[in-house]
Image (cartoon, helix red, strand yellow):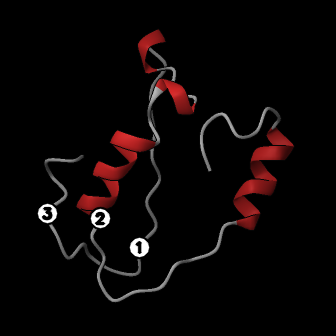
Amino acid sequence: MHLNTHTTKEGVLDGIREMRQRGGRQRNLGRALQFLKQNALTPARGSRSQEAVPQFVIVVSSGPSTDDFSQAA
């Protein structure tokens, strides 16, 4: 879900409720954060970081990352 997909609180909540977990054995949280930085947290997708609006990402994982995420974080 991109930052500019919904315009109301209800829309955002509905979008969150529609999210489904994707399976897999690898928990490449570093790669996931890098992907978000390059593809989701951009002005074209609704990011307002250029206006000094803080950018938050909530990560839910079934365990520790299987790759290094310190650089991406």
Are circles 1 and 2 on residues that touch, CB within 8 Å? yes
Crowdedness near tag 3: few (<14), some (14–19) or many (≥20) residues, C-alpha within 10 Å:
few
Mark drawn on residue 36: none
> What is the x, y in percent for residue 41?
44, 36
Secondary structure of the residue carrying tag 2 is helix
Point out the tag, 3 or 2, that comes first from the N-terminus: 2
Q: Give the Cα separation between the discs numbered 3 and 2.
A: 8 Å
- Residue 14 in the figure: left or right of residue 19: right
What number of labels is visible? 3
Residue type at mark 2? Answer: Leu
Q: Residue furthest top?
A: 51
Residue at x-position 13% and y-position 63%: 68
Residue type at mark 1? Answer: Ser
Pointer 2 residue: 29
Residue at x-position 27% and y-position 70%: 28
Residue at x-position 45% and y-position 46%: 57
Mark drawn on residue 61: 1
Mark drawn on residue 68: 3
> What is the x, y in percent for residue 71?
13, 47
Crowdedness near tag 2: few (<14), some (14–19) or many (≥20) residues, C-alpha within 10 Å:
many
- Residue 21 in the figure: left or right of residue 62: right
Point out the tag, 1 or 3, that comes first from the N-terminus: 1
Q: Give the Cα separation between the discs numbered 1 and 3.
A: 14 Å
> What is the x, y in percent for residue 25?
33, 89
Instruction: Tell me the mark number nearer the camera, choosing from 1 and 2.
Output: 2
Residue type at mark 3? Answer: Asp
Name above or below for residue 47 compared with residue 15.
Answer: above
Secondary structure of the residue carrying tag 1 is loop
